[in-house]
Image (cartoon, rainbow, N blue to C red):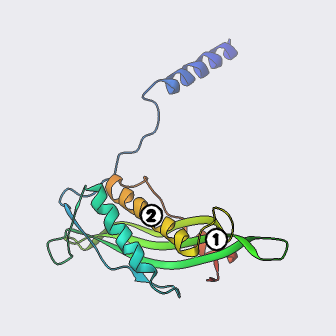
Amino acid sequence: MKKLFFAALGALCVGACASEGAYYKPQAQIMPQHIKKVAIRPILNKTEIFALEDKLYIELYDEFLKNGTYQIVNEDNGAEGVIVTTITRYLNVPIQYDSQLIPTVYKMDVWLDVVLMDKTTNQPVWREPAFLGTQTYSASTLPGGLTEQQARERIWEKLSKDIVKRTVEGFGSVMSENKKKVMQNPEYTTITQ
């Protein structure tokens, strides 16, 4: 009798969980209602690689314009929100070699610290301290290979789309890496070119 009772109870629980509305869906966390205009501050580059920030800024600006959800203005011209981006780490490491020890495949990683500041309260709306862009690519000497610059452009495009998606769609749409995990990993302690 007990077995039959527990079997019926288990079937009832499974049936209740299998119904349409029985799954976890968090509430969308979107921008505060008063933020209609967003400014993009010039990007700060804390790496040893020169002029990374310029191309990323242009790509990010263009991506916000393409999306069209928020008006892009200068910070002094009535912006209610400000995107503050810092390039914190850049790695371009060969991960595969040919028989003569010449690199044939590279892995490029770029970490950003991205914050959306609410100018009216001067508080962050959201922050992603270890936003990661990764591109694995073949050397430009191989068929279908990319140059380092082309790989960077692909990363800028991906990161820009992710930043816009995080801003427009809210928390959970795009997430950064765990900063402690990244910083404590010995594989990511050197900056190479």
Disc marking residue 140:
1
Disc 1 from disc 2: Cα separation:
20 Å
- Residue where numbered disc 2 is placed: 157
The image quadrant that residue 161 belongs to is bottom left
- The residue lying at 45 percent from left, 56 percent from top is 174
Task: Indicate the quadrant containing the N terminus: top left, top right, bottom left or bottom right.
Answer: top right
Give 24 or 13, whichever is nearer the viewer.
24
Instruction: Indicate which disc, 1 or 2, sits on the residue closer to the N terminus.
Output: 1
Circle count: 2
Tell me: residue 151, above or below residue 17. below
Q: Would you identify the image quadrant in which residue 141 lies?
A: bottom right
Q: Tell me the quadrant of the picture where the C terminus can be found.
A: bottom right
Whether residue 152 is situated above or below residue 42 in the rendered picture? above
Kindly identify the residue that appears in the image at 40 percent across and 45 percent down: 26
Residue in the picture at 30% in, 53% down: 30
Type of residue at label 1? Ser
Residue 188, how many percent across, how many down?
64, 76
